[in-house]
Image: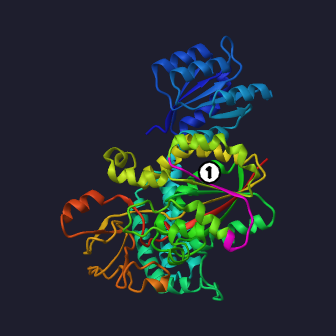
Amino acid sequence: MSNGLLLWADDEIELLKAHILFLEKKGYEVVTVTNGTDAIDQCRTQNFDLVLLDEMMPGLSGLETLQKIKEIMPAVPVVMVTKSEEENIMDQAIGSKIADYLIKPVNPNQILLTLKKNIHRKEIVAEVTQSGYQQDFSQISMQIGMCRSHTDWTELYKRLVRWELELSGTDSNMTEMLQMQKEEANNAFAKFIKGNYAGWIASLTPGATAEGRPTLSPEVFKRKVFPLLDKGEKVFMVVIDNFRYDQWRIIARELGDLFDIDEDLYFSILPTATQYARNAIFSGLMPNKIAKMFPELWVDEDEEEGKNLNEGPLIKTQLERYRRHDTFSYTKINDSAGAEKFMQKFNQLGHNALNVVVFNFIDMLSHARTESKMVRELASNESAYRSITLSWFRHSVISELFKQLAQTDCRVVVTTDHGSIRVSKPVKIVGDRNTNTNLRYKLGKNLGYSDKDLFTIKEPAKVQLPAPNLSTSYVFATGNSFFAYPNNYNYYVSYYKDTFQHGGIFDGRDDHTDITMTGKK
């Protein structure tokens, strides 16, 4: 079986017979020509896997030949092989998108390495990645069973996300095995949260110790933003709604050339939903405290108006409560028109000590995927969901914003309020007509359910959640489960199964990244 069909164009091809024999022994078929014109003719008649092209040939030069070949076969990798080390020739070749640049005399192993990089890269990467995950599989399984602290869980999740991203870039059949491990981790993580969450929330009260627990939503400003402001630094805070750690990892690759990045993780409060988690971030308070101290800024579940219309005023209350006098701005961006308007005033924001901007795209994407068949097809799985996120980042105003921020002296803090998970397991629940509509958490009176894996909070005050009625309780879905009502159950399940939802408990998707970035000047 042939490893590939090669075209080698060189006016001294007779002197390269030893190299050609070497490649043929390695399983490659090699077609040889002595000039650019013949090389172009060959490209018109055959499909090559790679072209080796001498830069200095009689008639058409290597660079001229390269341009013609790219017109005929734009996707085929072309390797320039030349005696010349002139920088301008290298620049022209690289500008013409050559795959590699080899200086004569070349040895056969150099050529073989180039072939492996450009022809067999995917197969080699897939094989090595699959083998690496197979070797790591048992260690991850042991790690799941040994997680005892929040740091153990964050390290485990980072490990799972790393393999998820690496395997998704290959055609590996290991993705199903990884999915099973993620489900196992989610189930164990839910038990961890059930056993520790109430204690974490209790430690938020004044005078209580925070030792042994993660940073929580109300502490993001206190622990991540205020220390920077105290050093006299200007801070630009970017909050991306419903933004997951795996999505951050692919965007981080885009930002590596612009910023020095420092990464840390915090845990979202329950419910892992915008109304609760983001309001907690901006206010520095748990939801029941917001409702008691600033009733005009809190909107209950059963009220019609939007639940996140008071974020700017909540930031102000937090600054005032800590007796801070930092000047700040707040902007929420929901569409391209709002984004353009924001960028027009970007230069005017430099006088503020703190600027906060919220991007709602990812949240809108998850909702659109639920409601739109076309969007569901476009984001059919986790990998496609990440791909759309990356495309949005590259082509929206947020990319331009980061480019401009990289040129300033301010520190950039990037974070989110909560994540999401692809749900697949329906759980029956019964509630009265005032029960909220979220698929991952329910609050109300006399909630009926039988699933033992759910997390129930019968006394909301103990975890600092509002209770519209004395008998109000909260129920949270765990792992990849979602709530469905018995009435019209089959339709409900078929509509919401495999959608991305938030509000409940799930490992990592609610371990949120606080990223502090400094521009590379």
| As drawn, 347 above or below 199 | above
Q: Residue at x 71, y 49 (%)?
A: 349
Near-viewer residue (372 or 348): 348
Does the stretch in magenta take in 397?
no
| Residue 327 appears in the figure | yes
Q: What residue range appears in magenta?
A: 320-334
**Left or right position of 392 against 330:** left
| As drawn, 74 above or below 271 | above
| As drawn, 387 above or below 32 | below
Q: Residue at x 38, y 85 (%)?
A: 458
* Most distant residue in the top direction: 59
Where is residue 136 drawn, in percent x and y?
52, 69
Where is residue 357 drawn, in percent x and y?
61, 54
Where is residue 487 drawn, in percent x and y?
18, 67
Near-viewer residue (47 or 244): 244
| As drawn, 8 above or below 513 | above
Near-viewer residue (86 or 503): 503
Q: Quadrant of the N terminus?
A: top left
Question: Badge 1 is on which residue?
Answer: 253
Where disc 1 sits, the SS reads helix
Does the stretch in magenta take in 322?
yes
| Residue 117 appears in the figure | no
Q: Amino acid at mark 1?
A: Arg
Q: Residue at x 33, y 51 (%)?
A: 371
Where is residue 69 drawn, in percent x and y?
56, 21
User: Picture quarter containing residue 81?
Assistant: top right
Q: Residue at x 51, y 21 (%)?
A: 72
User: Picture quarter containing residue 26?
Assistant: top right
